Each structure stands twice: as structure tokens, then as C-alpha cells.
Image (cartoon, helix red, strand yellow):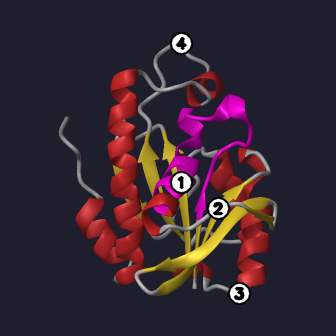
Amino acid sequence: MYIIVGLGNPGKQYENTRHNIGFAVIDKIAEQEDIAVLEKKHKAVIGKGYIGGKKCVLAKPQTFMNLSGESVRELADYYKVDEERELIVISDDISLDVGQIRVRKKGSAGGHNGLKNIIAHLGHDTFIRVRMGVGEKPKGYDLADYVLGHFSGEERKAMDEAAGLAADAVRTIIAQDADAAMNRYNHKVER
């Protein structure tokens, strides 16, 4: 079984912001795989279904970004998954260009408070993550204002394409493994 967690903040005011790209990818996967993500459980909105014949739980934590680990810990404990191989976390990343994706099997939080909280709750940093580039914060911008800001029209188009790529990367992880997804998706996208 796989747990696929998209990070974001609950509430209408955060919809379509840079920080909520994880939610957007979960929505894309749910739509493509016909999984209803409606059940409120484990401090998240979840949906259960199959991807490539394997049982999966899609989750959007409702704890706000900085407390994402509370939901992830509950999900991992309840479903008893192998956190290193069967937990996939999708998050935004300001160190990657808009529309760029990067798959990793472990690593630091890279300044991302949601990932930092997940690492603290799990007690380790060895879990698969799909990082979605939202572009570097412009000079003089407050980081919180930037990640909670909305995409421009051009960026939105690039992010919609990247959400599709991220969904494909998740399917590759499930069908093959993280190494296969890294080989296929960890390259610079030319725009």
C-alpha cells in the first residue's frame, strides 16, 4: 500500500497558491485515477483507490503546512506502511524553476516547514518526495508572501503541465520505484 500526501494549506484563500501545489497534484491524480478524495480522517481529507493495481491512499493534510507531520504520522501509523518505500510526499520548492519537478528518496527539508515537521514527526528523512518547482522568491519579497501568492497566467499553465508530470512520476514510483522516476523526471524542463 502507498500513501501519497500532497502538502498545502486548507481554506479557500490558499487555493491555487504556490504553497498548495501538493494539493493540486493530489487533485490531478484523483481525477486521472477516479479516486474521490472526500473522507475526513487522520487530520486530512483522504481518498482510497488503486493506481497501477496497487492500493493507495491520497491525502491532503488539513493541519496547515507547518503541522503536516501530525497528519503524515497518523496516516503512516494507521496504514502501517514502509515509510522509506511506500510514503510519497509532494511539496512546493522555491529552489527549482517553475514547472520543474525533482524526485528524491531522502534529504533535508531544504527550509520547507511542512517537510521539516514531517521529518520531526517521523524521526527520519528517508521517504520519497516529489518536489515541485515554484520559482525563486524575487528580491525584496517576504518568503511567506511569495509562497502564499498566486501564479501568473503563464506560470499557471506551466504548473498545470508540471502537475501532470508529477502525477506521472508518482505512477512510475508505484509501478517501478523511485530510482526509475528519478531517472525519468529529474531533468531541466526547457520552456
Mark 3 falls on what kind of element? loop
How many C-alpha atoms fall within 10 Å of the one at disc 2: few (<14), some, or many (≥20)? many
Quick check: is 14 in the magenta stretch?
Answer: yes
Q: Residue at x 67, y 46 (%)?
A: 113
Considering the image in quadrants, where does the C terminus appear?
top left
- Pointer 4 residue: 140
- Pointer 2 residue: 37
Q: Nearer the viewer, mark 3 or mark 2?
A: 2
Check whether the beta carbons of the residues at disc 1 and disc 2 lie within 8 A of each other.
yes
Quick check: is 90 in the magenta stretch?
Answer: no
- Pointer 3 residue: 80
Predominant secondary structure, magenta span: helix
Where's residue 98, x and y in %?
36, 36
Residue 100 in sight from this viewpoint: no
- Reading the chain from its start, which is encountered first: label 1 or label 2? 1
- Magenta residues, as a range? 5-29
Which amino acid lies under the numbered mark 3 shown in the image of this protein?
Lys
